[in-house]
């Protein structure tokens, strides 16, 4: 009898152990991936970054590229934006120049010939890369970040690394590479899987596009992330920041706010409200973490946004940047040729949230009205970035189009119908690159009657 009881106890122990292991690893998986499935990416980046005592970054990037087109490639193109961040190469860029020194570009033991003109990096391959084949290219370079720069910046002892590494360009019957234009996003890159290893001279708070998990200062680490469009990393001096963490659904939201600021709770709470609204009304967010850095950057990146330090700007700008996670990141587009596809839909989504938040269908669109009234708008919103002058770009893309969409849906069921359309659009195109024609066709199919007159009034 004692032997039987002992055997039963052993079985119970094994069952509990197995349950614990399964539960633990399911929790780990949930922390990594959030709510929904994440597709496999054909491009992978293994980036090693070392920051010297003087704040210079030494970078080595192994990039595995898959030719997913129907044509062989004799070369490969990347966006390498830091090289264009100087006023000599880029009109409209007025900040301090970034410093770039290209050390080597190789594939295996072969040194590869390359051309670096502005932000366009073309690498000539030793032999053509056929459809379906893969090749790894290693790019080593040194980067000095501009002090108080735009997006890519060093501010005192804080470093904000945006578009800081070679990003594989999109191939669409040829490489899609444009001149850097600081008024918007002139680069487009596809989804990739990332391994990011960093070595720093001191301990920093680390916030990146990968799941960082712990808001604890460190000087080294390795992070991994899947299906990331472009990889952002911030190294924050712990003495300068306070952190609040919240949970919405399966996603952790981490708010980094200056130490002397009094808006930590407001930033954290509003971010949860906005995030939950978009997830409930538009679609699940499939990642485990979203970071918010209150550095007045007013910019979106995958799984991380730069938001205001000013409490009066939180509702309009913070909400807008969070909405970009759905329209720019999870549903992609070419921001150079069709900035409206992410910016206008994002501002429209922001207006819907704020209308609900304040209980007034018109109040949420005050920001869009201010943009539209600030300058004469263009007839068509689908001009390329270099065809807009700066004031008209903001007035048209951030103002005119969201208000046109508001008027359209006000006649067809209001905000509820608008949210249903956005949810269907998100479901149809998640993790895809949407073109203007695809949007037109989807819009036409979503409503009874002919919508061409409405679409032709603002799209060419």
Image (cartoon, rainbow, N blue to C red):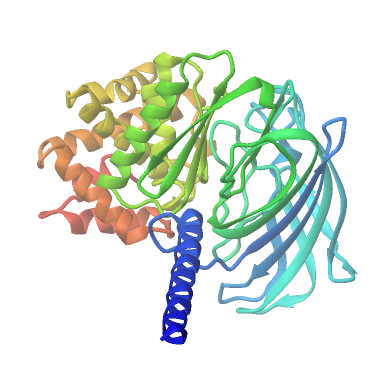
In the depicted view, which residue is nearer to us: 165 or 74? 165
Say if 61 sits above or below 417 in the image: below
Task: Tell me the residue at 27%/27% (across/down).
Answer: 354
Task: Tell me the residue at 48%/76% (across/down).
Answer: 14
Q: Is residue 27 visible?
A: yes
The count of marks equals 0
Q: Is residue 382 visible?
A: no
**Residue at the extreme front of the image, as rendered:** 1
Task: Tell me the residue at 41%/86% (across/down).
Answer: 1
Q: Position of residue 439 (x, y in %)?
A: 32, 54
In the depicted view, which residue is nearer to us: 382 or 191? 191
Quadrant location of residue 94?
top right
Q: Position of residue 110 (x, y in %)?
A: 88, 70
Quadrant location of residue 95?
top right
Say if 346 sits above or below 43 in the image: above
Say if 225 sits above or below 400 in the image: below
Quadrant location of residue 128?
bottom right
Q: Position of residue 271 (x, y in %)?
A: 39, 32
Q: Is residue 154 left or right of residue 377?
A: right
Q: Position of residue 152 (x, y in %)?
A: 67, 33
Say if 368 sits above or below 5 in the image: above
């Amino acid at each position: 009898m004692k032997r039987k009881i002992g055997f039963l106890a052993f079985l119970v122990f094994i069952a509990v152990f197995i349950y614990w292991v399964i539960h633990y690893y399911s929790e780990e998986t949930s922390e990594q991936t959030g709510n929904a499935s994440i597709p496999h990416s054909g491009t992978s980046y293994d980036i090693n970054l070392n920051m010297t005592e003087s704040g210079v970054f030494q970078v080595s990037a192994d990039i595995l590229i898959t030719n997913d087109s129907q044509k062989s490639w004799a070369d490969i193109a990347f966006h390498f934006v830091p090289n264009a961040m100087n006023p000599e190469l880029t009109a409209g860029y007025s900040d301090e120049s970034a410093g770039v020194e290209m050390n080597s570009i190789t594939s295996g033991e072969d040194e590869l010939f390359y051309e670096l003109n502005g932000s366009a990096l073309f690498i000539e391959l030793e032999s053509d890369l056929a459809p379906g084949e893969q090749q790894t290219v290693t790019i080593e370079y040194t980067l000095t970040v501009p002090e108080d720069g735009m997006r890519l910046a060093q501010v005192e002892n804080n470093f904000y690394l945006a578009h800081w590494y070679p990003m594989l360009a999109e191939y669409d019957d040829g490489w899609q590479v444009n001149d850097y234009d600081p008024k918007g996003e002139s680069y487009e890159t596809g989804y990739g899987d990332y391994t990011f290893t960093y070595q720093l001279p001191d301990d920093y708070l680390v916030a990146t596009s990968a799941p960082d998990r712990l808001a604890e200062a460190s000087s080294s680490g390795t992070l991994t992330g899947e299906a990331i469009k472009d990889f952002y990393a911030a190294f924050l001096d712990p003495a300068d920041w306070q952190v609040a963490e919240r949970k919405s659904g399966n996603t952790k939201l981490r708010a980094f706010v200056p130490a002397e600021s009094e808006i930590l709770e407001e930033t954290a709470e509003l971010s949860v409200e906005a995030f939950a609204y978009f997830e409930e009304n538009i679609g699940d967010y499939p990642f485990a973490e979203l970071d918010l850095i209150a550095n007045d950057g007013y910019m979106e990146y995958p799984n991380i946004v730069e938001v205001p330090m000013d409490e009066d700007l939180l509702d309009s700008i913070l909400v807008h940047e969070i909405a970009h996670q759905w329209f720019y990141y999870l549903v992609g587009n070419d921001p150079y040729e069709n900035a409206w596809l992410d910016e206008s839909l994002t501002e429209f989504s922001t207006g819907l949230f704020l209308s609900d938040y304040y209980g007034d269908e018109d109040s949420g669109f005050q920001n869009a009205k201010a943009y539209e009234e600030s300058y004469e708008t263009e007839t068509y919103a689908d001009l390329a970035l270099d065809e807009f002058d700066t004031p008209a770009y903001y007035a048209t893309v951030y103002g005119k189009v969201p208000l046109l969409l508001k008027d359209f849906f006000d006649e067809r069921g209001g905000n509820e119908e608008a949210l249903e359309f956005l949810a269907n659009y998100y479901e149809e195109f998640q993790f895809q690159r949407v073109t203007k024609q695809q949007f037109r066709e989807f819009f036409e199919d979503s409503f009874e009657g002919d919508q061409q007159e409405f679409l032709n009034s603002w799209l060419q």
